[in-house]
Amino acid sequence: MSCSKLSKKRKIEEECRVFNENWTEKYFFTDVGVKAACLICSETVAVFKEYNLKRHFQTKHANFGHNLSKQELQKRANGLTKRLKQQQNVFDKTSSLQRNATKASFILANKIAKQNKSFAEAEFIKDCMVDAVSIVCPEVKSKVEAISLSRRTIVRHIDAIAVNIHEQLLTASGFLLL
């Protein structure tokens, strides 16, 4: 096979396909990152091609919205899109809560290590924080309870901090890590 034939081969990633906003009302699909997601059944289509979306809609949802006007279809599409965004926000909030709890755990582990305190004191600190927060700001209590401060977690976090500092020192001094 010649080199010219290799260069003519199509690649989906290089076609730069873009999601068309009209497809939301027409076929009940929305753009979710690099894929199109069906608002009705939540299946995804990998390639932004009208034919793929139309085929999915006609084979799986042929009778959906058959007796609705264009305005009603538009309202239904907007409502389904809003519902999908709300579902995605739930996962974002959960992951950001977990990320913040982990960050707080690292900060407390660092402070415990700097003060040469026992790892078991982290659990005592957490109990104190939960008690104080439940009085001062009860709506935040669940967030404080999500912070993991067990002895094993503190040990792992202190080890991770030590490895990170060691790597920073090696990088700063010009040694290459193998």
Image: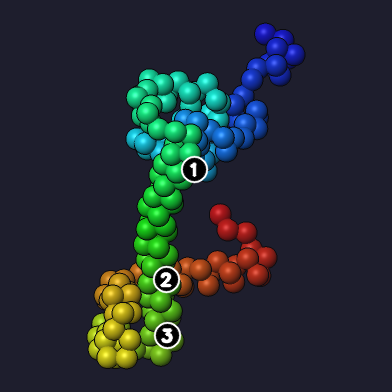
Tag 3 residue: 111
Tag 2's secondary structure? helix
**Front-most of residues 26 and 125:** 26
In front: mark 3 or mark 1?
1
Give the CA separation, mark 2 to mark 3: 17 Å
Give how far across and how far down residue 96 sits, in percent.
42, 65
Tag 2 residue: 100
- Are there few (<14), some (14-19), or many (20+) residues within 10 Å of tag 2? some
Tag 1 residue: 32
Vertical order, 157 against 135 (above or below):
above
Give how far across and how far down residue 36 sits, in percent.
49, 36
Residue 111, visible in the rendered structure:
yes
- Are there few (<14), some (14-19), or many (20+) residues within 10 Å of tag 3? some
Horizontal side, residue 21 vs residue 112: left or right = right
Q: Amino acid at mark 1?
A: Val
Q: Residue at x 38, y 88 (%)?
A: 116
